[in-house]
Image: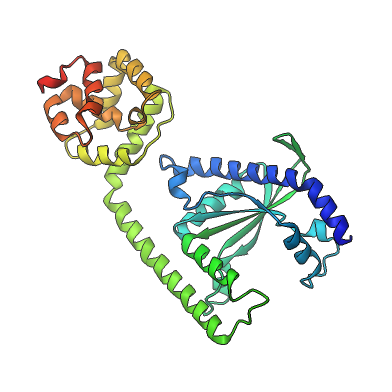
Amino acid sequence: MTEDELIEKWSAERPMYEAWGDYVVARVIDQVRSQIAPLAVDLFLRLPPKPRVKADASFLEKAFYRNKSYSDPYGDITDKVGVRFVVLLTDHIRVVSDAITKCPDWDASKDRDFEYEQQQNPIQFDYAAVHYVVRCHSELSVSGHVVPAGTPCEVQIKTILQHAYSELTHDTIYKPTVEATARMKRAAAKSMALIEATNDYFQQVVDQVSESIAPSRSLSENTSRLYRKHIQLEPQPTRAEGLIVDTFEQVAGEDVAERIDRFLTSKPQIVAQLRERASRKLLFRQPSILLVYLLANEKPTATKSNWPLTPEELRPIYVDLGKAFDNY
């Protein structure tokens, strides 16, 4: 294959690869969302994942000028389209890995695994990431394009610190025009060592925070389950969810989930009003709003005095309960 033939074929197929990359991103996000709920995906992923197709010059360089000895340059190059998922911690990499390997739409081969590489060479500190190549099982129709079976897409998963390292080294010491000196390589290795240590400290902080917020998380998970059951909508927790749970967790009392369940079962008109408000206001899509309704019904004065947002945001709940807000 000549350079002109490669570019001609690439120009014809690039839109299909762009559609395939978009499809892979959407499917991975779907799988991740189901694993991290109720946490929102955009809070879990530290950068928006955007598929990128190879630029013509980059494709030509890789196919013909890197001594790769491809028998079929076009078919052998698997990163014609690629996407990178960036997370906070190495534990989070496993969540995305699971999402990729469990997706039924493709076969996934793991081409790089930094943990395996570190086991093989434990005294080396270098580029770290997990790379997969996913290939669709069968022909797919995606956004008006036919994606043939076996079409590859490279997926990289990195922590945000690993991403910073790769951006630094890719743009500097590993460019062909830059001679990587021993001093540069030593500095890069030290930075990766520091990144690994920092990740360990980050993980300690996350573990300690997770332990301290476990009761709040449990309350939020229970209200999310009840929200789906009674409101029959998917809750959309934001930072307001944490603020409300933090405020009322200590005053909620015992058997909160059971009390909310009984309260909503006995008040179908409240369920209908809440569902209608959820269609218009984000506050009513927080799962903890069920707890606010319960407490406003049981302890209207204390609930009003502890409410962490503006009074006007609480007033409609009292209206729905048939209580005169200004009397409390």
At x 56%, y 72%, the residue is: 169
Count the labels in the image. 0
Percent across and percent down for residue 147 are: 76, 41
Question: From where the camera sits, is residue 115 visible?
Answer: no
Q: Quadrant of residue 62?
A: bottom right
The N terminus: image quadrant: bottom right
> Foreground: 194 or 117?
194
Percent across and percent down for residue 193 are: 46, 75
Percent across and percent down for residue 93 are: 51, 56
The C terminus: image quadrant: top left
Question: From where the camera sits, is residue 156 visible?
Answer: yes
Percent across and percent down for residue 83 are: 61, 53
At x 23%, y 32%, the residue is: 255
Residue that lies at the very extreme toward the bottom in this rendered image: 182
Residue 95 in the image: above or below residue 287 = below
At x 44%, y 57%, the residue is: 88
> Foreground: 71 or 176?
176
